[in-house]
Amino acid sequence: MTATVPPAPSAPGPDTGSPGRVELPPGAVPEDPRFVNADLLPVPVARRRWTTYNFAALWIGMAHNIPSWLLASGLVTLGMDWKQAVLTIALANVIVLLPMMLTGHAGPKYGIPFPVLARASFGLRGANLPAMIRAAVACAWFGIQTWIGGQGIFVLLGKVFGGWADASRIGGQPWTLWLCFLLFWALELAIIHRGMDTLRRFENWAAPFVIVGALALLVWITVKAGGLGPLLDQPSRLGWGAAFWPVFFPALMGMIAFWSTLSLNIPDFTRFGAGQRAQIRGQALGLPTTMTLFALLSVFVTSGSQAVYGAAVWDPVELAAKTDNVFGLLFALVTVLVATISVNIAANVVSPAYDLANLAPKLVDFRTGALITGVVGVVIMPWKLTATPELYIFTWLGLVGGLLGTVAGILIADYWIVRRTVLDLAGLYRPGGPYWYRNGWNPRAVLAFAVGGVLAVGGSHSAPGTGPFPEDGLIPVLKPLADYGWAVGLAASLLVYLLLTTAGARSVRTGDGS
């Protein structure tokens, strides 16, 4: 069976007595190893029990991490004052929350992960295109976070034991740093190996622990400084005029891109949700509020550090290492461990584990996918992406945001506008079924992705010496769009997909289509 346009909405399957939630009866899914394994099947309704607190705790645990702390510092380095930096971060997270809730809707309703949801728009085989893009981004982030976590352990243990930085070097780094990195890497994979319920329990207690740790750092530096430092009174080097907006818009897209990864694969978590109210309230309470407060906290702590040390210390690990109190150092060490593990496992291991399982269900299950993610995240050495604020915010986050926004536009258009949230659940696993399209690929989704992707990132440019792109942009005529990559990608792919789908449906009705 070959379909060239999305099928008309069909009955979603048997209602299990839980409003708005769908479950497959036993034996409804064919056991085709090319498209099915236990990790990709819908979560039974009885196991969808994550509450509002679970989702809020998930976001609190993920938002409280060192790269999040450094976002505000990166924006200040680019010339913003603390008010402009916090405003940019707050606005970005309010914006990205909307697509997160929209794509997250399919989780509690159907119990499916992101790559299975993508089959509805891209096709059973075509879903591997967005899944592999998401997996590649997650692997890079996993490496970044693991390296940062390993550095944190290295610095803090070096203060406790002394002499670590003087160890013999391998690959330009002390072997003790590589040991910390390896141990941290192994600890992360050990936790995820135990499954999603273990992750839920870990996030439940990690979230309040990290908040306490961050507040303890604020109290410590405030007492030491005798009040917050002068940084809060420093004016913006950009002002609010013509110099501000060329920095603001690409920075806003970069801040959106920071969590645009989760705007795609949030169904990997919401599939365990007790209902739509739990995921909507939990995400609304957890994401924008936490990121904004964390940005404020980082600015206040850094302000105090300037008063104490005469220079702003933006890295919380470096700041914590300045204390000579052994208990304080150990507490900071545990906080860094918990904070980094919390975000890295949830944001950067769960998604590629499912994505890789979708690529080869017969060979790769969730745990195997997690191990592959860990290995790839180290091999590609992504820590180089954080070398400068320009490279981190404009190049890395801007490029990633443009591509992921393009995928999000197609998912939202297909699920909400074309299908009005009605899916043939069994058909998502059945070759030759309603989502088979042309040999497992939906050409319209692929074309919409290509158009949106080119418009979003085709104009990518770098100032001389600050990045890998030509100064005039990869495609000079598209350079003006590059600063709005995420928004351009999402809007363009959504519109192109809808136009192609509407035109295809019309041609079939008039007898002109295949």
Image (cartoon, rainbow, N blue to C red):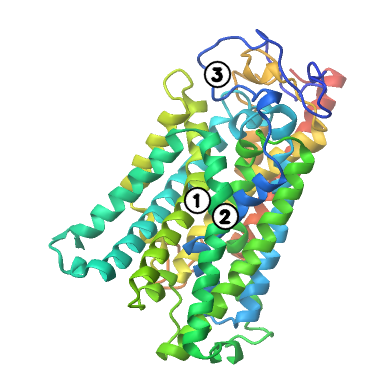
305 or 35, which lies in front? 305
* The residue positioned farthest toward the top in the image shown: 27
Instruction: Select label 3 or label 2 by which is in front.
Output: 2
Instruction: Select label 1 or label 2 by which is in front.
Output: 2
- Residue at position x 52%, y 45% in the image: 202
64 or 402, which lies in front? 64
Looking at the image, is mark 1 or mark 2 earlier in the sequence?
2
Residue at disc 3, secondary structure: loop
What whole-number distance in Å separates the C-alpha atoms at marks 3 and 2? Answer: 35 Å
**Residue 165 coordinates in the image, percent (x, y):** 21, 68
Callouts 3 and 2 close, C-beta under 8 Å: no
Q: Amino acid at mark 2?
A: Ala
Looking at the image, is mark 3 or mark 2 earlier in the sequence?
3
Around disc 3, counting alpha carbons within 10 Å, would you say few (fewer than 14), some (14 to 19), or many (20 or more)?
many
Looking at the image, is mark 1 or mark 3 earlier in the sequence?
3
What whole-number distance in Å separates the C-alpha atoms at marks 1 and 2? Answer: 8 Å
Report the quarter where the C terminus lies.
top right
Residue under label 3, please give it. 35
Quick check: 124 above or below 57?
A: above
Q: Quadrant of residue 391?
A: bottom left
Residue at disc 2, secondary structure: helix
396 or 39, which lies in front? 39
Residue under label 1, please give it. 342
Q: Quadrant of residue 117?
A: top right
446 or 394, which lies in front? 394
Report the quarter where the N terminus lies.
top right
**Residue 41 coordinates in the image, percent (x, y):** 60, 21
Residue under label 2, please give it. 207
Q: Quadrant of residue 417?
A: top right
Around disc 2, counting alpha carbons within 10 Å, would you say few (fewer than 14), some (14 to 19), or many (20 or more)?
many
- Residue at position x 28%, y 49% in the image: 182
